[in-house]
Amino acid sequence: MEDKNTDNVDLSKAGGQTKLRIAVQKSGRLSEKSLNLLKEAGISLTNGERKLLAQSGSYPIEVLYLRDDDIPQYVKDGVADVGIVGENEYAEKGSAADIIERLGFSRCRISLAIPKQHEYTGPEYFEGKKIATSYPVILQNYLDEKGVNAEIHVISGSVEIAPAIGLADGIFDIVSSGSTLISNGLSEVDVVMKSEAVIIGDKDMEPGKMEILNDLLFRIRSVQAASNNKYILLNAPNDKLDEIIAVIPGMKSPTVMPLAESGWSSVHSVLSEKQFWQVIGKIRELGAEGILVIPIEKMIV
Ligand code: ATP
Ligand code: MG
């Protein structure tokens, strides 16, 4: 049973030695989600106590645990074949390597913020001012693009307190809910970049590794499709069947089976999470009853 997950990957190539080395964040906001993604893709790691390098007994992969700042460079140097990193960190390190897949988690934005009592007039507000940030490269590119001269003060943490302690006039930092800004008396004035977790790597990697990567991507997409969709079962009056089916088209088309009670059918389909509540509202209006919604574990698309 151990080998169940290796079905699609030919381990016999290169004497079974070819492994894909993937860099993930050692500890931080990306770690748990990155490892969870691998786990859901059927990849179990042997040394769980997070040494620098972990192996998998079930898949030709090695996991390298690093600080997120180091991941783009390790991938660029070929020490790791691919890495899971925030797009912001990838951009900050000069877009080393290629973005291979967007993962949709750890979404955030990188924004400029100023003390809330000040009036923002546009990027020229920052002319001659001091901005504290951990992302000097992205910020400098933005300022150059806008033709603004500002002094960038690089700090590695707690950027949001810089204006209050007189270190800077504004900040350029990660924002997700915005609550950190509010509690520091700052207001977000310009969203410079939107970010999510991405897989980076060299698109021209050696064929053996590419084969493993493609299999991994196939698994990841199946896991993601599953979490973005639900399986739905409902009872529909036959005279409304066509209208109900039109709102829940499913993967190909819904399964329709007669109920024991005449005049009614059971309809099974797949529904995207995004339109979920809207569709449920419509089918109820059309007379659907006994609606059951079930999570999908994997969805092969
Ligand atoms: P390391 O110790 O590895 O250098 P770090 O402190 O630089 O970690 P984290 O705070 O763990 O970084 O954040 C890692 C990544 O997670 C960020 O680069 C960003 O892409 C994303 N991220 C950061 N903060 C948030 C947030 N509040 N919401 C969503 N995503 C975030
Ligand atoms: Mg970091």
Image (tube, rainbow, N blue to C red):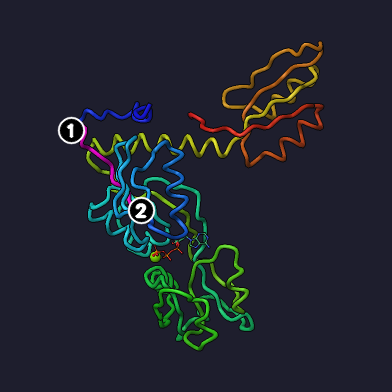
Q: Is residue 279 magenta?
A: no
* Label placed on residue 199: none
Between 294 and 275, the one lying in front of the other is: 294
Cβ(mark 1) to ligand 1 < 8 Å?
A: no
Give the percent coordinates (x, y) of residue 300.
48, 29
Q: Is residue 167 above or below residue 172?
A: below
Query: Would residue 272 be found to the left or right of residue 223 on screen?
Result: right
Mark 1 or mark 2, whichever is nearer to me: 2
Q: Is residue 209 above or below residue 300?
A: below
**Label 1, label 2: how far apart the Cα atoms are:** 28 Å
Three-letter code, disc 2:
Arg
Q: Is residue 19 magenta?
A: yes
Q: Secondary structure at mark 1?
A: helix
* Label placed on residue 50: 2
Residue at the limit of the structure toward the left, as seen here: 15
Residue located 51% across and 87% down the image: 165
Task: Specify the quarter for ligand 2.
Answer: bottom left
Q: Secondary structure at mark 2?
A: loop
Are the two marked residues, 1 and 2, in contact with CB atoms closer than 8 angstroms? no
Residue located 79% across and 32% down the image: 284
Report which quarter residue 296 is drawn in. Answer: top right
Q: Which residues are magenta?
A: 15-23
Give the percent coordinates (x, y) of residue 135.
41, 70
Give the percent coordinates (x, y) of residue 119.
62, 81
Residue located 46% across and 52% down the image: 32
* Label placed on residue 14: 1
